């Protein structure tokens, strides 16, 4: 079994221990994982503080940092992944990278450019139900938009879980939903390997 090269982006909380634990879990399954720090060492205890900092730095600068982090590895064919804000970054990069092997979105999505092309790109989204940041109407429009772009999308919803339910250090945490998410995500990555092989 081969392994995937995964670029895993953190949420607006910054590069917290949960991101490293997630990366370790993926590595234990045989994958190579990078966890770029788009906030250059800053982490936050509340989503509000994180969002304030994100807005201060600015979307363009953060995307530039993400692109620079991924660039040295993109020739290998990356799977882009991320948590919440990091998922929106991962989506933007994956849709702009014709060598992308897959897109794993945890707790987040992003706008889709009109001319986006994701020719057969395998995409898996895991999101709470309901989620204040990812409303049903938004997700329906997102799903249709990704389909129009040519992506192959699977969506998993977790009733009653908090927004960032995979992070054990946050009040959002839901262990059952988190374990189900990782089981499904690891299966998704295995399916990408089979296609690649």
Image (cartoon, rainbow, N blue to C red):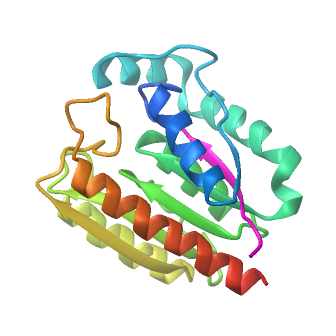
- Count of residue discs: 0
- Closest to the observer: 102 or 193? 193
Figure quadrant of residue 47: top left
Does 58 sit above or below residue 85? above
- Point 27% across, 29% down: residue: 170
- Point 49% across, 62% down: residue: 112
The x, y position of residue 132, in whole percent, is 18, 46
Q: Does 6 lie within the magenta span?
A: yes
Figure quadrant of residue 113: bottom right
Does 133 sit above or below residue 140? above
Q: Does 179 lie within the magenta span?
A: no
Q: Is 77 on the left or on the right of 17, as rendered?
A: right
Magenta residues span: 1-10
The x, y position of residue 22, in whole percent, is 51, 44
Q: Is 19 on the left or on the right of 175, as rendered?
A: right
- Residue 104 visible, this angle: yes
Assign the N terminus to one quadrant of the image: bottom right
- Residue 121 visible, this angle: no
Residue at the farthest left position: 160
- Point 69% across, 58% down: residue: 31
- Closest to the observer: 119 or 194? 194
The x, y position of residue 95, in whole percent, is 63, 64
The x, y position of residue 148, in whole percent, is 49, 82
Assign the C terminus to one quadrant of the image: bottom right
Does 107 sit above or below residue 47? below
Residue at the farthest front position: 28
Q: Is 146 on the left or on the right of 163, as rendered?
A: right
């Amino acid at each position: 079994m081969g392994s995937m090269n995964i670029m895993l982006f953190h949420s607006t909380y910054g590069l917290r221990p949960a991101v490293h634990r997630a990366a370790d879990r993926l590595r234990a399954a045989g994958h190579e994982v990078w966890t770029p720090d788009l906030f250059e060492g800053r982490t936050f205890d509340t989503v509000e503080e994180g969002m304030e900092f994100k807005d201060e730095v600015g979307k363009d600068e953060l995307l530039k940092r993400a692109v620079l982090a991924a660039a040295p590895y993109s020739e290998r064919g990356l799977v882009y992944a991320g948590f919440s804000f990091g998922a929106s970054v991962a989506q933007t990069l994956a849709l702009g990278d014709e060598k992308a092997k897959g897109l794993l979105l945890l707790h987040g999505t992003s706008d889709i450019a009109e001319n986006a092309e994701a020719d057969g790109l395998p995409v898996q989204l895991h999101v709470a139900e309901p989620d204040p940041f990812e409303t049903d109407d938004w997700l329906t429009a997102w799903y249709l938009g990704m389909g129009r772009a040519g992506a192959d999308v699977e969506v998993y919803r977790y009733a009653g879980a908090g927004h960032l339910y995979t992070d054990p250090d946050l009040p959002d945490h839901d262990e059952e939903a988190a374990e189900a998410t990782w089981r499904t995500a690891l299966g998704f990555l295995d399916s990408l390997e089979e296609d690649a092989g």
